[in-house]
């Protein structure tokens, strides 16, 4: 008796274990973000730009270092940030980078990229919840300072007139 055709080629489907140590952690405010990312970022010698992709309940689903820079800066483009967010089907995201100098105050470039990311997120329907700058022992949150509004997961066209 022979096995049905193709039966020997079947593979058991398994869901990979999450490689992110904080996978599933709920992120609601800057303190949560700092508790997740500070151990990874606060002692770096150069600036790095990281993203946390969240589901609709603010649970971490993916973490990625998007760009690595120099001692005093990192260049990041919205396409790099949102490429992963779209592929991973993120409901929303958090962005973060470190300041090796120890001063978490945002530079004009930090403010400019935050504004660009907010605009891109609105267009794509993947809101940016916060941009947190991490320094040794301190941080700066754009959300906490009122520079970013609370993000909700909703369709990109939800507020367009005549759509629905």
Image (tube, rainbow, N blue to C red):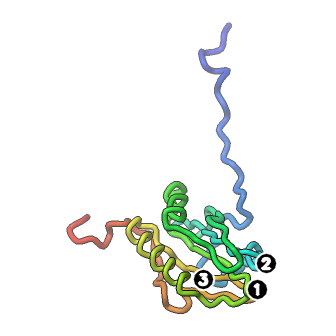
Picture quarter containing residue 22? bottom right
Label whose residue precedes the other's in the sequence (2 or 3): 3
- The one of 71 and 93 positioned closer to us in this rendering: 71
Picture quarter containing residue 13? top right
Residue named by callout 3:
29
- The one of 78 and 35 positioned closer to us in this rendering: 78
Picture quarter containing residue 27? bottom right
Q: Residue at x 67, y 68 (%)?
A: 68
Tell me if mark 2 has few (under 14), some (14-19) or many (20+) residues whose alpha carbon lies within 10 angstroms of its own: some
Q: Secondary structure at mark 3?
A: loop
Residue named by callout 2:
43
Tell me if mark 1 has few (under 14), some (14-19) or many (20+) residues whose alpha carbon lies within 10 angstroms of its own: some
Asked if the residue at tag 1 contacts the one at tag 2, i.e. Cβ–Cβ closer than 8 Å, the answer is yes
How far across and how far down the image is residue 110, in percent? 55, 82
Residue named by callout 1:
136
- The span from disc 2 to disc 1 (Cα, nearest Å) is 7 Å
């Amino acid at each position: 008796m022979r096995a049905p055709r193709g039966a020997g080629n079947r593979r058991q489907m398994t869901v990979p274990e999450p490689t992110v140590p904080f996978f599933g952690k709920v992120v609601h405010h800057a303190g949560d973000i700092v508790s997740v990312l500070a151990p990874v970022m606060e002692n770096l010698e150069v600036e790095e730009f990281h993203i946390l992709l969240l589901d609709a309940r603010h649970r971490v689903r993916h973490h990625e270092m998007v760009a690595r820079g120099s001692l005093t800066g990192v260049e990041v483009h919205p396409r790099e940030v949102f490429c992963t967010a779209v592929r991973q089907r993120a409901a929303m995201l958090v962005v973060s980078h470190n300041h090796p100098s120890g001063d978490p105050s945002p530079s004009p470039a930090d403010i400019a990229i935050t504004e660009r990311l907010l605009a891109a997120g609105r267009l794509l329907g993947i809101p940016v919840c916060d941009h947190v700058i991490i320094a040794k022992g301190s941080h700066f949150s754009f959300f906490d300072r009122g520079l970013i509004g609370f993000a909700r997961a909703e369709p990109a066209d939800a507020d367009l007139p005549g759509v629905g």
